[in-house]
Image (cartoon, rainbow, N blue to C red):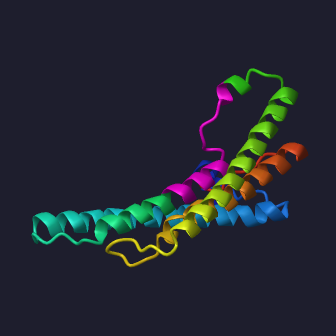
Amino acid sequence: MKEAELAPELHLQEPHEPDASGLLTRINAPLARWCMKLSVAGLLVIVVIVFYQVFGRYVLNNSPTWAENLALVLVLYVTLLGAAVGVRDAGHIGLESLLVLLPERVRNRIELVIHVIVIVFGGYMIYNGIVLGLSVSTYKIPNLGLPELVRYVPLVASGVLVILFSIEHVIALLDGTEVVPSWH
């Protein structure tokens, strides 16, 4: 007899993988996981940079001048990638408490409208990120030497991700299925 049959309550189940029935889901699920992993890694790097800056200032009496600007740039990447994953995993702020009270047909229509609005917002993120990034691309970030454009790359990338993830939700609503969160 197998171990799982002898003590089924002790048998650990494998993590639930997203339904890979659609091409977009097969692309978006791993993409969302990688974005979240990058965000977590970026957050850890920010902690190390801030610790190094504090150590340099108060222990070495020689604060690194690049640390604050690099931490600020990384905050943009961490925040915007994490926010895009929040759209896919439905972790964003919503009025679900009010939607639950509505009939399913009305609720699905409202959710469709919400996802279309989010798609439009993602488009504006892309457009404005490109316009703003190009307008400052010749300037350099002080103490880093990087072009100011790097501050706007996460805005454009997040806009693309928000659109992809919202389209996946729209398809799922039209098919009568749900998008399984990729991050557990």
* Extreme-top residue of the structure: 101
Question: Could you say where residue 147 lies in the image, as x and y percent from the top left?
Answer: 46, 75
**Quadrant where the N terminus is found in the figure:** bottom right
Tell me what residue is drawn at x 30 percent, y 69 percent. 67
* Extreme-bottom residue of the structure: 145
Tell me what residue is drawn at x 65 percent, y 29 percent. 95
Number of numbered discs visible in the structure rendering: 0
Decide: is 23 above or below 90.
Answer: below
Tell me what residue is drawn at x 79 percent, y 32 percent. 110
Decide: is 94 above or below 123.
Answer: above
Chief secondary structure of the magenta span? helix
Residue range corresponding to the magenta coloring: 79-97
- Of residues 19 and 101, which is closer to you in this image? 101
Q: In this view, does 62 lie to the left or right of 108?
A: left
Q: In which quarter of the image is residue 91?
A: top right
Asked if the stretch drawn in magenta spans residue 39, the answer is no
The answer to whether residue 109 of the structure is visible from this angle is yes
